[in-house]
Structure formats: structure tokens, C-alpha cells
Amino acid sequence: MTAADGEHEVALRDSRRLTSRLIPVTGLPRPLPLRLRADGAYLVTGAFGALGRILCRRLVARGARRLILVGRTPLPDRDHWHAVAPDSATGDRIRFLKELEALGAQPVLAPLDISDETALTAWLAGYRRRQSPPIRGVFHLAGQVRDTLLPEMDRTAFDAVYTPKVLGAYLLHRHLSDEPLDHFVLFSSIASLLTTAGQANYAAGNAFLDALAHHRRARGLPALSIDWGPWATGMIEELGLVEHYRTRRGMSSLSPKRAWPFSNASSARTGPNCSSPPSWTGRSSSPGTRSRRLWSLT
């Protein structure tokens, strides 16, 4: 414990002194391009966010034709789209739907809060009653941040961040148990391993996603939880935190162009959990090298 080696986190196990390390995974088979089934449906939570939109476009490019877009904000009936202001938030969502249609997809709207079990089960019942295509994949991206230091953290601040990730993922796990799922992908965060002050709620929510992936794999069910580093788009960009992570944490943010090759590689991984840490500023590495690698915690 008193060794002068600069380690700040030490565990003693069976007379051994241990520390944690993120190490690159080696020896993986070369990943095949992800292919999705045109006769199935793929459910995406957080679909209208920046990352959700990027993912939806990528799913369509990989062969998905029916996308179930889960979001809390309802859209007007199609007959009324012409009356919506193009520069409004609703108009922006309508443009995204039309874009997916132009790419050959059939968007299916599920206007509900993913943490509302009653709303979710009612929507799924209606979907199945219409004999719609089976759900073949789940991509859980829903989430938000509300950084609060522990002395000021109350239940409202904690649940606002924790609930969409945890309850949303659990309800999907529970109520899609009879669906022939090929994919159950959870967008977690490196914050579950390397958190920052004020993000206890965010770290806890993402740690649950990692644990749920392990639980599903132990039961023989598909699951993958990806601990993404900070993105250069979405919430990080909207909150103006790209520079914060670079200067205060030494983390460069992941651009979609650099990060998505990693998601292809993750399909070759046999474990339920993997990490895509950012490039660490001030260390010698070619641009994007670390963001394309799979990492495990040891």
C-alpha cells in the first residue's frame, strides 16, 4: 500500500497487490461487416439525438429496412406535416424521417418514454397485434446528463440521468425476451470506468448497462455494452464540453468517422463488454489509433 510507484487505486487479493489497467484486446478474428435483415425490425432508443441519427443511417446502410424509433416527443400525423415550420424542432425530426425513407427505410414511430413500463408494453402489444415484423435488434442510446456533486445530489437529479439508462434497458430486456433478437446493443460510457466529479448518477447508470450485458450473456442471450469515450457530437458538443475533456481530462473526443470502425470490430468480440477509450492527449499515437481498438479492463 505504501509503495512509491504512483498508484492511487490498489487492491489486495490473496497476498497479491493489484491495480487496474485498460489493455488492448489482441487476437480477435477479422470482423465481418454487420448485415441486418430486411424482414426484421430494429428498435432504437434516443433515435432523434445526434448519435441516434448517425446510427439509424448506418443501420439502413447495413440492410435494415424497418426502424422503430423510440422517443418521448410525439409527431403530428403525416397529413399535417406540411403545416409544420421547417426550422422548428418538429420540422427537423420530420426531415430526418423523410431522409430515412429516401434511403429505403420504413420508420415506425414509438412516441413513448422508454422508462414507462405501461406505455412500452401497450405499444408492443399493439405492434404485435398488427402482426408486424419481429424485432431482431435493440440499440439503446437513450440518456442525458445532469452533473451534480454528491453533497447537492438529490433523488430528482439522480433519477433524471439514471432512470432512462437503467430502467429503459431493463424493460427492453424483460419485455423483448420472446423476440428473436440477434442484437442487443447498449451504448454505455467510459464514465463507468473513469468517471469525473459530478457524474455519480451517469457512472452508475452506465455501470448497470455493463452489468446487464454480462447478465444476458450468462443466460445465453445476445448482448454487447460499449463503453464509449466522449463523443465530439451529441450531448458533449451541445454542452460545450469537448474542450473541457481535452484540457481538463486529457481526452480527445471521438468523431463518428473515427469511432464507427470500432463498432464494426466489436461485433467480432466474444465478451459482453468492451471499451473505446479516447485518444489521450500528450501521448504519442497516430490520430484515431486508440479509438479503433478494443479494450478490456484487467
Image (cartoon, rainbow, N blue to C red):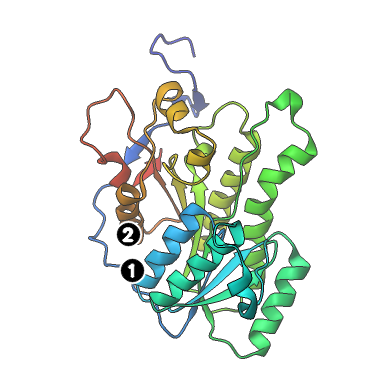
- Amino acid type for the residue under numbered disc 1: Leu
Up/down of 268 relative to 135, above or below: above
Which quarter of the picture shows residue 4?
top left
Q: Is residue 203 left or right of residue 275?
A: right
Residue picked out by circle 1: 34
Give the image location of residue 235, x and y in percent.
Answer: 53, 43
Up/down of 281 relative to 214, above or below: above
Q: Is residue 212 left or right of residue 63?
A: right
Which quarter of the picture shows residue 30?
bottom left
Identify the residue at image location x=78%, y=40%.
Answer: 156
Camera-side residue: 30 or 3?
30
Q: 10 Å neighbourhood of mark 1: few (<14), some, or many (≥20)?
A: some
The residues bearing labels 2 and 1 have C-alpha atoms spaced at a distance of 7 Å
Residue picked out by circle 2: 264
- Amino acid type for the residue under numbered disc 2: Asn
Up/down of 141 relative to 75, above or below: above
